[in-house]
């Protein structure tokens, strides 16, 4: 397992699990910041020199609003490449949100991120650092939310990079929503789908 792949894999973990977590008490505009969710994701890493690595995995997480503007969140994600390389990530942090318009919020988050990549016969690499994100969430209809975000993660030792994500959540019944999204980072692309359970809808 090359050092370059290790660093890119660590960043893949850092960005991948956040892809569908659009910084998630119900705000006046119908946007909820209190929920739990599970996602399935496909991860593609450009190793360089014409080589790519593809994997898939899952993530679980949640968010809880603590007052009208502040919320806390946490999540865990795991991915596997060719049944040989395993990626694991844990994050926890907080965020602030405020309305941009009647139907749209902006938000900012700061999180502690811990990531590990391991390969059979090659050992493992792990690191921790911080991740920040800035994004928007908009209820284009009572059931449909669109979101977009830009993020940056620094895991130390040269493993740092930026990315952005887009996607949607659609409330199918009561407090249950289904989502799809995509994330694009430095040499890392993620696609996924998930289910979310709101506490306050």
Image (cartoon, helix red, strand yellow):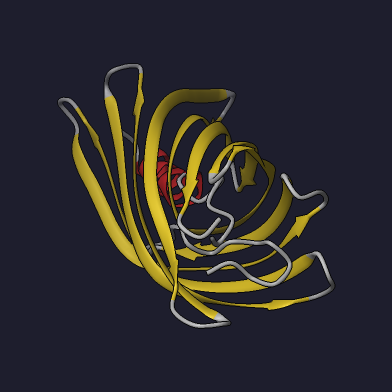
Residue situated in front as seen by the camera: 111 or 84: 111
Q: Is residue 184 above or below residue 150?
A: above
Residue 120 horizontal/vertical position (percent): 18, 25
Q: Is residue 177 above or below residue 152?
A: above
121 relative position to 158: left or right:
left
Q: Is residue 1 above or below residue 96?
A: above
- Where residue 59 sits, quadrant-wise, is top left
Residue located 29% across and 28% down the image? 85
User: Number of labelled discs?
Assistant: 0
Residue 18 horizontal/vertical position (percent): 50, 51
Observer able to see residue 12: yes
3 relative position to 148: left or right:
left
Residue 101 horizontal/vertical position (percent): 84, 73
Residue situated in front as seen by the camera: 192 or 35: 35
Q: Is residue 109 above or below residue 34?
A: below
- Where residue 134 sits, quadrant-wise, is bottom right
Residue 142 horizontal/vertical position (percent): 76, 50
Residue located 56% across and 64% down the image? 152
Q: Residue furthest top?
A: 82
Residue located 69% across and 43% down the image? 167
Q: Quadrant of the N terminus?
A: top left
96 relative position to 74: left or right:
right
Observer able to see residue 45: no
Q: Quadrant of the C terminus?
A: bottom right
Residue located 50% across and 36% down the image? 195
- Where residue 188 sits, quadrant-wise, is top right
């Amino acid at each position: 397992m090359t050092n370059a792949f290790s660093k890119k894999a660590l960043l893949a973990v850092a960005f991948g699990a956040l892809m569908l977590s659009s910084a998630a008490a119900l705000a006046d505009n119908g946007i909820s910041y209190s929920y739990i969710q599970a996602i399935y994701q496909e991860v593609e890493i450009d190793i360089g020199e014409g080589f790519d690595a593809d994997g898939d995995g899952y993530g679980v997480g949640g968010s809880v609003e603590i007052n009208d503007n502040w919320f806390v969140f946490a999540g865990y994600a795991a991915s596997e490449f060719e049944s040989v390389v395993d990626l694991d990530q844990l994050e926890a942090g907080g965020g602030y949100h405020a309305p941009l318009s009647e139907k749209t919020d902006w938000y900012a988050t700061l999180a502690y991120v811990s990531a590990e990549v391991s390969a059979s016969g090659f050992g493992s690499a792990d690191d921790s650092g911080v991740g920040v994100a800035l994004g928007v969430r908009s209820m284009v209809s009572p059931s449909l939310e669109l979101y977009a975000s830009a993020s940056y993660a620094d895991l130390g030792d040269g493993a740092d990079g930026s990315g952005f994500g887009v996607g949607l959540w659609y409330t199918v019944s009561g407090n249950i929503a289904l989502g799809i999204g995509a994330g694009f980072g430095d040499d890392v692309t993620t696609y996924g789908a998930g289910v979310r359970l709101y506490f306050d809808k």
